[in-house]
Image (tube, rainbow, N blue to C red):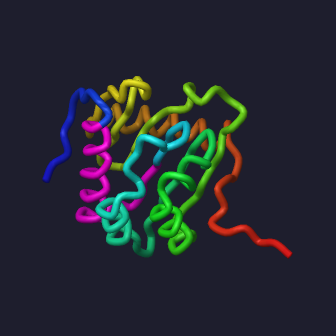
Amino acid sequence: MALPSGRFEGREAFRQLVRDAMACAARAGWRELVLSDADFADWPLGERAVIESLRQWSAAGRRMTLLAGGFDAIVRLHPRFVQWRVQWDHLVTARKSGSVNATDLPSVLWSERWVLQRLDPVRSNGVSGSEPARLVLQRELLDEWVLARSAPGFPASVLGL
């Protein structure tokens, strides 16, 4: 199944594209995923189908970067994802950029083959595609956020005394 290119509108269309992208990542063996959002509240990360896709995707040599303004919504709304993240911590790098306006943070699912970008997170409108220029532009933007505008966050476990 090929992922679509072009505009999408609405929360359910966005959520379905995330589901489809995760299933495609598992089937096609995408090596890297970058997920970026202010809080991931609208994402279907806790759904059984998405977790199953992530389990299938998880393998040696794979890696995922999570970038958020905060991870409280993931913990509260997506407990299955939190459990998956604990199990596969060695594949996941989580970064927090809490000192900026949450609306400034890109809402993007990026892979080396396809990208999904919400241009208006409030209305869940955006674009998707696999054009090389789009992939490179989004990766450069995400790298700037990850490398220069964020710090480690969302540990898989909290060690205490």
**Corner quadrant of residue 145:** top right
Where residue 129 sits: x, y (%)? Answer: 26, 36
Give the residue displayed 41% in from the left and 57% down from the top: 46
Give the residue displayed 32% in from the left and 34% down from the top: 11
Residue in front for this viewpoint, 86 or 32: 86
**Residue positioned most to the left:** 1
**Bounds of the magenta segment:** 12-34
Give the residue displayed 66% in from the left and 61% down from the top: 155
The quadrant of the image that shows the C terminus is bottom right
Q: Tell me if residue 23 comes above or below residue 69 in the rendering.
A: below
Residue 42 located within the stretch drawn in magenta: no
Give the residue displayed 34% in from the left and 38% down from the top: 116
Where residue 125 sits: x, y (%)? Answer: 33, 26
Where residue 84 sits: x, y (%)? Answer: 48, 68
Residue 32 located within the stretch drawn in magenta: yes
Where residue 30 sits: x, y (%)? Answer: 33, 60
**Corner quadrant of residue 10:** top left
Residue in front for this viewpoint, 4 or 71: 71
Q: Tell me if residue 141 comes above or below residue 86 in the rendering.
A: above
Q: Main secondary structure of the magenta part?
A: helix
**Corner quadrant of residue 15:** top left
